[in-house]
Image: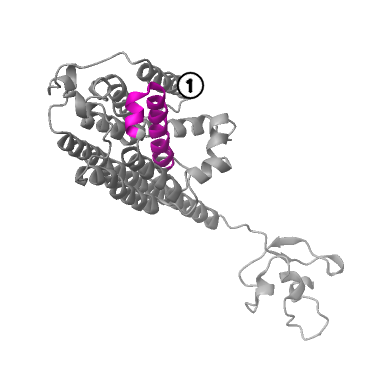
């Protein structure tokens, strides 16, 4: 293979079977889901569909079929770029398409196999913020401080497994962060914003470790001896750490912004719900039931129930104002001590 040139970043492509299969797996189910949602009147916003296609599927295609795939075994920093994109950028793009939210709106009762899995015990453990953050950051770090990276570029099977692990750990963290009802109740929008901020800081650790290493972390990497990359192996490794760091920090702010916007929308929904409840209470308070009655004169002291008048002479005690008890306990002013209301005498 000839020496890598900057133009290869755009012109070098390969029809990698794994990459094509992953792209189809990402496109077809989502397209069918959006079609069902459109028929049901709950189609996601056009912006979310664009983010899913460009930031999600687009970066997946570039990482698995573009220059990072063509030179993954020859240029260390391009191999590191592929790892960083699959671990951070692609999961964020797929999550911003809101596939879980669309599925929840189509199945509000949760009666779908994927929703049952996401709400299952294993998923709740894996998506717990501390667990998912450690999985995502720890996996990315282990790739470069262990022989995993070298193994992934020399064995096609190991490469496929690593790609799936990177996508999985990234989705485990970001999907619950941007979806509803997948995190514990205490993970309110402010807490999610804080978690996104902490994750942005931790995502920088693998890139910093690789970039500042003074020795080769992957001495068996075939590109260090092929001469395709051009620069010195240690410089190539440092460029790889810089690529990891740039990718991690470039998507950190968008994630924080997305979670913050969801926080704002949640406050607006709560405010509208509170205003609606207050309006309903106000309307209910203006409609007072007129059940108060007072006995009128009748044969044998038995009177017919009629609406009470304001001059009933009550003392203001609560049982005299209660419609059910007023006729029974109103004070007598006749002085007879008979306990019969004055209004009830002829």
Magenta-highlighted stretch: main secondary structure?
Answer: helix
Residue 15, position as x, y percentages in the image: 31, 13
Is 180 a magenta residue? no
Residue 270: % across, % down:
43, 50
Can you tell which quarter of the image residue 113 is in? Answer: top right
Image point (52%, 56%), residue name: 286
292 to 144, vertically: above or below: below
The stretch of residues the image draws in magenta is 149-176
- Colouring used for the render: one colour
Residue 93 in sight from this viewpoint: no
Q: In the shown orientation, is residue 30 left or right of residue 140?
A: right
Left or right: where 60 falls relative to 188: left
Q: Quadrant of the C terminus?
A: bottom right
x and y, in percent, of residue 195 in the image: 36, 50
- Residue 250 location in percent, x, y? 23, 39
Is any part of residue 241 visible from this angle? yes
174 versus 59 height, above or below: below
Residue under circle 1?
Answer: 36
Q: Secondary structure at mark 1?
A: helix
């Amino acid at each position: 293979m000839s020496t890598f040139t900057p133009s290869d970043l755009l012109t070098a492509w390969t029809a990698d079977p794994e990459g094509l299969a992953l792209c189809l797996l990402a496109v077809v189910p989502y397209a069918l889901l959006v079609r069902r949602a459109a028929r049901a009147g709950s189609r996601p916003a056009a912006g979310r569909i664009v983010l899913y296609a460009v930031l999600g599927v687009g970066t997946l295609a570039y990482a698995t079929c573009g220059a990072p795939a063509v030179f993954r075994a020859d240029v260390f920093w391009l191999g590191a770029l592929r790892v960083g994109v699959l671990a951070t950028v692609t999961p964020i793009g797929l999550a911003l398409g809101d596939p879980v939210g669309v599925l929840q709106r189509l199945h509000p009762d949760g009666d779908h196999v994927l929703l049952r899995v996401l709400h299952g015990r294993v998923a709740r453990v894996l998506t717990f913020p501390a667990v998912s953050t450690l999985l995502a950051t720890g996996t990315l770090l282990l790739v470069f401080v262990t022989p995993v990276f070298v193994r992934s570029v020399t064995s096609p099977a190991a490469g496929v497994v690593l790609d799936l692990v990177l996508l999985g750990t990234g989705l485990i963290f970001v999907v619950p962060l941007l979806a509803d009802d997948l995190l514990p109740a205490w993970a309110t929008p402010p807490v999610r914003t804080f978690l996104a901020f902490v994750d942005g800081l931790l995502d920088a650790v693998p890139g910093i470790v690789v970039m500042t290493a003074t020795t080769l972390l992957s001495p068996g990497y075939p590109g260090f001896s092929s001469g395709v990359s051009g620069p010195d192996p240690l410089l190539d490794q440092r460029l790889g750490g810089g690529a990891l760091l740039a990718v991690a920090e470039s998507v950190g702010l968008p994630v924080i912004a997305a979670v913050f916007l969801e926080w704002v929308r949640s406050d607006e929904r709560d405010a509208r719900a509170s205003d609606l409840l207050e309006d309903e209470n106000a309307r209910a308070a203006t409609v007072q039931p007129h059940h108060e009655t007072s006995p009128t004169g009748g044969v044998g002291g038995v009177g017919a129930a009629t609406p009470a008048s304001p001059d009933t002479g009550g003392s203001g005690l609560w049982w005299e104002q209660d419609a059910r008890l007023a006729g029974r306990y109103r004070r007598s002013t006749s002085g007879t001590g008979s306990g019969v209301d004055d209004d009830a005498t002829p």
